[in-house]
Amino acid sequence: MASKDRILRLKDDTRNNILAASIDIVKEEGWQALSMRKIADKIEYTAPIIYEYFANKDAILNELTRQGYVKLGNLMQQAISEHSDPAEQLEAMWLAYWNFAFAEKELYQVMYGVEVNCCAMQNMCPDIQKPMNMLWDKIEEIIPADKRTEEYVDTKYYTCWSVVHGLISINMTRKLTSDEMNKQVLKDAIGGIIASMK
């Protein structure tokens, strides 16, 4: 039994090493440089071993995308727990989203197609849906019952997301202003959208 556990642990370690090597390559050389051969060279394995864990590069990108959404969902959950007012929770969630984008730049890029083609996930697994659902639910909670329709909630969700993602994308491709100004723009925009919901 112990040897079976050890084998599973080694397989998990190898899989995690492949993913970590992928991110390292992207940090050093950009997404265009990522290849199965480079990953194999980086972790000193042969390419066929990499294929035992991931069918192709897209499978690696899909797993990195899933992991990114898990991390983002956890950060948003933490942001919610730090506030009791729903409007403050929503603002904190968007700030967590902003912070994630720059702390985990490479994951954000593959999740949302900034400087790389994002993954077309065949099945929207719960991990990927969680951050979006959390934001949508919080927006729905803030909107008064007499205005609360699916279309209205969708509109407010996409308005917020467009502003936040747009500002992140601008800053990832070309930094135009200071971090302080960007955060103020973000807070002003989110605050204005939240005020319009009430």
Image (cartoon, rainbow, N blue to C red):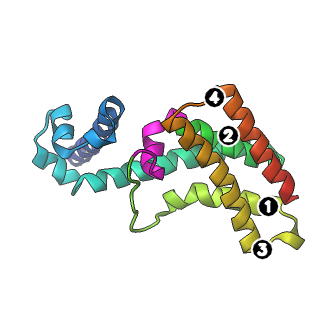
Quarter of the image holding residue 123? bottom left
The residue mark sitting in front, 4 or 2, is: 4
Residue 86 seen: no
Within-10-Å neighbours for mark 4: few <14, some 14–19, many 20+: few
Query: Which residue is tagged 2?
Result: 95
| Label 4–label 3 contact, CB within 8 A | no
Mark 3 to mark 2 CA distance (whole Å): 25 Å
The residue mark sitting in front, 4 or 3, is: 4
Query: Which residue is tagged 4?
Result: 177
Against 29, residue 46 (above or below) is below
- Earlier residue among tags 4 and 2: 2
Q: Which residue is drawn at 63% across and 53% down?
A: 162
- Is 131 displayed left or right of 184 in the figure? left
Q: Which residue is drawn at 67% across and 56% down?
A: 135
Residue 180 seen: yes
Question: Which numbered disc covers residue 149?
Answer: 3
Which amino acid is tagged 1? Glu
- Earlier residue among tags 3 and 1: 1
Mark 4 to mark 1 CA distance (whole Å): 33 Å
Q: Specify start and end residues of the magenta stretch as a single range.
A: 102-115
Query: Which residue is tagged 1?
Result: 141
Q: Which residue is drawn at 38% across and 48% down?
A: 116
| Label 3–label 2 contact, CB within 8 A | no
Mark 3 to mark 1 CA distance (whole Å): 12 Å
- Earlier residue among tags 4 and 3: 3
Secondary element at tag 3: loop
- Earlier residue among tags 1 and 2: 2
The residue mark sitting in front, 3 or 1, is: 3
Which amino acid is tagged 3? Thr
